Amino acid sequence: MALLNIRNLTVKFATATGSFTAVDGIDVSVDKGEVLAIVGESGSGKSVSMLAVMGLLPDTATITADEMTYDGRDISRLTASERRRLIGREITMIFQEPVASLNPSFTTGFQIEEVLRLNLGMSRSQARARALELYRAVGIPEPEEKLKSYPHQMSGGQCQRVMIAMAIASNPRLLIADEPTTALDVTIQKQILDLLMKLQEDYGMALILITHDMGVVAETADRVVVQYKGKKMEEADVLSLFEAPQHPYTRALLSALPENATGDRLPTVSDFFAQEAAR
Amino acid sequence: MSAPQTPVVEGRAIVQDYHVPGGMFARAKTVRALKGVDFKVEKGKTLAIVGESGSGKSTLARVIALIDAPSGGELRIEGKPVDIRRQRPGPEMRSKVQMVFQNPYGSLNPRQKIGDVLMEPLVINTNTPAAERRERAEAMLAKVGLQPEHFNRYPHMFSGGQRQRIAIARALMLNPSLLVLDEPVSALDLSVQAQVLNLLADLQDEFGLTYVFVSHDLSVVRYIADDVMVISKGEAVEQGSREVLFADPQHPYTRQLFAATPVTDVEAIRARVQRRKAARAVA
């Protein structure tokens, strides 16, 4: 049975000029221990659908779905306290801007210990010991020292490691990573992706990776969902997607990669839609 | 025509120091962002400068674009030494070198209409009459793939890709010979990135432009560059033609960069999927 199962999810935002549909009838499911990549360009609704699951959308959003279940439980019917027990413990999330995700006025150690104390009910000394353990697990050098560091004293890659440490603190069964490496250099990106994949295997958790980068998809995913303008274009296992993309939009995205350039010009997505229309 | 062509831009032992003033608790210190970098770019060619954050690639771009004066070394534009500390570059020199920045949301004035954005370089640097300024701005809009009705619109009415087209149009208004592009497609979606890269290639052919293209993305560099400079901690660790550098990287840092770049090759994916299956079977 799927760990997270979403059917026909629609998210609408009330705006000054009327209702805007950001996600339009999306189905997403992820199994235990599986890595699912949701890939799309800006405005494809790839983040919004996951924020809806986490309950992080503003009041202007209207969420409807035929089914939204986690481990057989209906997420949309949870009470606030049930939701708090689920989100942040069993389902956790990391975001794109690691430095902005941390509070600049507290040490990173304080922030991770806060998660451990409030969410898992640990005592101060337990939390300190566990924080140290987590810093080691995510490969932060000099962990004792770094627990006392403020976010601005650490690099972007290290801050993302701290965010990952927080996210795995409760041994979650599902981690949602929203563009976790977009703000990082390629060599750091590689380290963070390797770390996420290692943790995913060690802890057997499911991972949903939201990204715009086909390279990241190629290096991590088991299965891929391609989204465009709030709709699902294609869903396939990673090898079939790259080997034989079915949807014209996927083909367009793959051929727009500079490394796949044939000849002098890069084919663009609009070229592809023009070709499809001409057919 | 003399046989060896004068490079459009040439740098010899460019050094840049930043002075960090001391505060209540900190001592003043000097950071050497560029440690003697040499380069030259021939007319109509593209030099890509590749590096990670903090490598000094943008510092070098600002020196080449005559925005910052280097602390040491010599910069030559079309064979002539330029020292902006000693002598402010005149309109003629400013017209030769133009720059396009990374973030098209930050590099356009939100209160300035697109037409005014494009005409401003002409107002500042030339005596072109108003009617002709307008004509040239409209022609340039068409060149970069925008419509005449965009002339009176404000930047917020455009998408990221369109704004980057506007920034490129503004840089081209003075018919420069050298365009310095600092991560021009990093903020753009993949499909829009392809459009802007195509546009840059077309404009280079049409106007014989020379590009200095700063990027962290090796796949973009491989597509657009003639020559590549890999820069790390203020030093050019490797320089060469694109073919040679990509076929046979010499420096450990270049190799590390290549190894970290994700590959979308089907065989590599197949190998990874199989490794994962095998690991699961054991567990």
Image: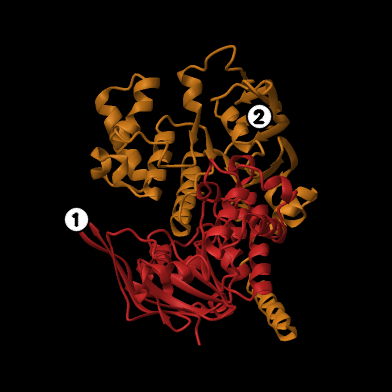
Chain colours: A red, B orange
The chain holding disc 2 is: B
Task: Tell me whether the residue at label 1 lies in contact with that at label 2, contact meaning CB atoms closer than 8 angstroms.
Answer: no
Front tag of 1 and 2: 1
Left or right: residue A229 compared with residue A17? right
Q: Is residue B164 in view? A: yes
The C terminus of chain B lies in quadrant: bottom right
How far from the left and from the top, in percent, is residue A247?
43, 76
Checking the image for residue B124, the label placed there is none
Q: Residue A63 falls in which quadrant of the image? A: bottom left
Q: Is residue A279 in view? A: no
User: Residues under labels 1 and 2: Cα distance?
Assistant: 53 Å
Label 1: how many Cα within 10 Å (few below 14, some 14–19, many 20+): few
Q: Which residue is mark 1?
A: A17
How far from the left and from the top, in percent, is residue B192?
43, 55
Left or right: residue A248 compared with residue B272? left
Left or right: residue A99 compared with residue B115? right
Q: Pick whichever, A155 or A108, lies toward us.
A: A108
The chain holding disc 1 is: A
Q: Pick whichever, A219 or A268, lies toward us.
A: A219
Label 2: how many Cα within 10 Å (few below 14, some 14–19, many 20+): many
In percent of the image, x 66 and y 59: which residue is there?
A126
Q: Secondary structure at mark 1?
A: loop
Outermost residue on the bottom side: it is A1
Residue type pointed to by label 1: Thr
Q: Residue B122 falls in which quadrant of the image? A: top left
Checking the image for residue B10, the label placed there is 2
Residue type pointed to by label 2: Glu
Q: Secondary structure at mark 2?
A: strand
How far from the left and from the top, in percent, is residue A31?
53, 81
Query: How many numbered markers are drawn?
Result: 2
The N terminus of chain B lies in quadrant: top right
In percent of the image, x 36 and y 61: which residue is there?
A57
